């Protein structure tokens, strides 16, 4: 348990919350079936206030909705919360093909009888997992109707033709949503009322340094300032609608640093991780100019690590 709480203690998260989380974990041990779904996140979440709000909401028994722009750490926070609480994770990604049967389950013929093949929401509810509802504002009406029942205070799901499902007392659901993506829509009031909502703030320079240092502990200070400065420049440009958010890709930045580590030049790595994600030629020129001000073409691996 120490590993899960070390980074929280380093951020000076309220000790009372930590004690309550430890008590929660003790009260609701994970079943053997769910142990392989308790996954350590690749990146810890940095942000004391956000962590405290999210932990308090989940301890109180509420579900969480994380809204905000791209690269604000919504999914990273959701994965970290499941790890902190020691719960199995069920990732449920919403798209045009996600319907009630993919969430609850569908009939299948097995052992000469019709049985229910359980979906992600059913298994999460049954095993007391944390369900991450990714891009929840892309949910179709059919899928949204399942969410209404699942997230209701009664904590019961009725499956036609089968027994009702009582949600495990440790089960929680964490929705994530971006505004303005193709295919998204406004969530109705009834669904939003079933969540406590956290509006995720933009990534700060301090937290970005922590993330890069966590992934690349041996990065040189000059390179750290250059790569983090590039991302923050892109963030400002995107927030001012001067470019789209395509190139503002934290995963791409970290992947670029990984490519540098194996021998690619920083310039080439950033082209793949950042610049080439702006498919519009004019936008790509703007991004390329921003890269040139931060990452010199003559840099080699030795300037970074």
Image (cartoon, helix red, strand yellow):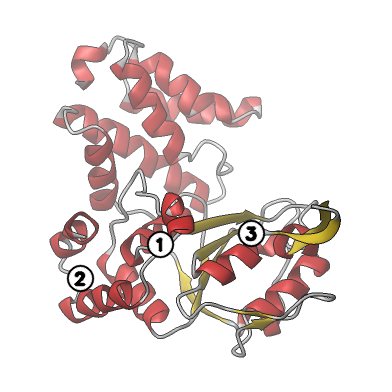
Q: Which residue is mark 3?
A: 120
Q: Looking at the image, is mark 2 or mark 1 earlier in the sequence?
A: 2
Q: Position of residue 287 (x, y in %)?
A: 49, 30
Looking at this view, name the residue that lies furthest to the bottom: 154
Q: Is residue 72 visible?
A: no
Front-most of 207 and 106?
A: 106
Numbered circles on residues, count? 3
Q: Position of residue 95 (x, y in %)?
A: 73, 52
Quarter containing the C terminus: top left
Give the Cα separation between the discs numbered 2 and 3. Answer: 31 Å
Q: Position of residue 187 (x, y in %)?
A: 69, 73
Front-most of 161 and 279?
A: 161
| Callout 1 crowding tier (Cα within 10 Å): few <14, some 14–19, many ≥20 | many
Residue 273 located left or right of residue 263: right
| Callout 2 crowding tier (Cα within 10 Å): few <14, some 14–19, many ≥20 | some
Give the Cα separation between the discs numbered 2 and 1. Answer: 16 Å
Q: Secondary structure at mark 3?
A: helix
Between circles 2 and 3, the one closer to the viewer is 3
Quarter containing the N terminus: bottom left
Q: Which residue is mark 2?
A: 13
Q: Secondary structure at mark 1?
A: helix
Residue depicted at x 64% and y 28%:
279
Q: Secondary structure at mark 2?
A: loop
Residue depicted at x 49% and y 70%:
128
Task: In the rendered structure, find residue 82 and report the number of the disc placed on it.
Answer: 1
Q: Is residue 23 visible?
A: yes
| Callout 3 crowding tier (Cα within 10 Å): few <14, some 14–19, many ≥20 | some
Front-most of 250 and 110?
A: 110
């Amino acid at each position: 348990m120490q590993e899960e709480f070390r980074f929280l203690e380093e951020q000076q998260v309220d000790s009372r919350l930590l004690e309550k989380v430890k008590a929660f974990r003790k009260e609701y041990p994970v079943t053997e079936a769910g142990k392989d779904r308790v996954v350590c996140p690749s990146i810890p979440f940095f942000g004391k206030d956000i962590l405290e709000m999210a932990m308090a909401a989940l301890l109180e028994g509420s579900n969480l909705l994380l809204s905000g722009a791209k690269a604000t750490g919504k999914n990273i926070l959701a994965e970290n919360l499941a790890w902190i609480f020691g719960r199995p994770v069920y990732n449920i990604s919403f798209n045009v093909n996600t319907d009630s049967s993919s969430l609850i389950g569908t009939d299948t013929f097995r052992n000469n009888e019709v049985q229910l093949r359980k979906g992600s929401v059913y298994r999460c509810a049954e095993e007391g997992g944390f369900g991450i509802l990714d891009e929840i504002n892309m949910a179709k009406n059919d899928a949204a109707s399942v969410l209404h029942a699942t997230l209701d205070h009664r904590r019961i799901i009725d499956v036609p033709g089968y027994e009702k499902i009582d949600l495990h007392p440790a089960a929680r659901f964490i929705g994530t949503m971006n505004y303005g993506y193709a295919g998204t829509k406004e969530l109705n009031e009834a669904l939003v009322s079933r969540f406590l909502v956290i509006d995720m703030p933009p990534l700060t320079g301090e937290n970005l340094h922590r993330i890069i240092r966590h992934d690349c502990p041996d990065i040189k200070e000059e390179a750290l300032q250059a790569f983090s400065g590039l991302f923050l420049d892109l963030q400002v440009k995107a927030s001012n609608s001067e470019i789209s958010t395509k190139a503002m890709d934290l995963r791409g930045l970290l992947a670029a640093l990984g490519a540098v580590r194996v021998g690619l030049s920083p310039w080439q790595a950033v082209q793949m991780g950042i610049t080439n994600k702006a498919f519009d030629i004019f936008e790509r020129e703007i991004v390329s100019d921003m890269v040139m001000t931060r990452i010199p073409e003559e840099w080699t691996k030795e300037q970074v690590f």
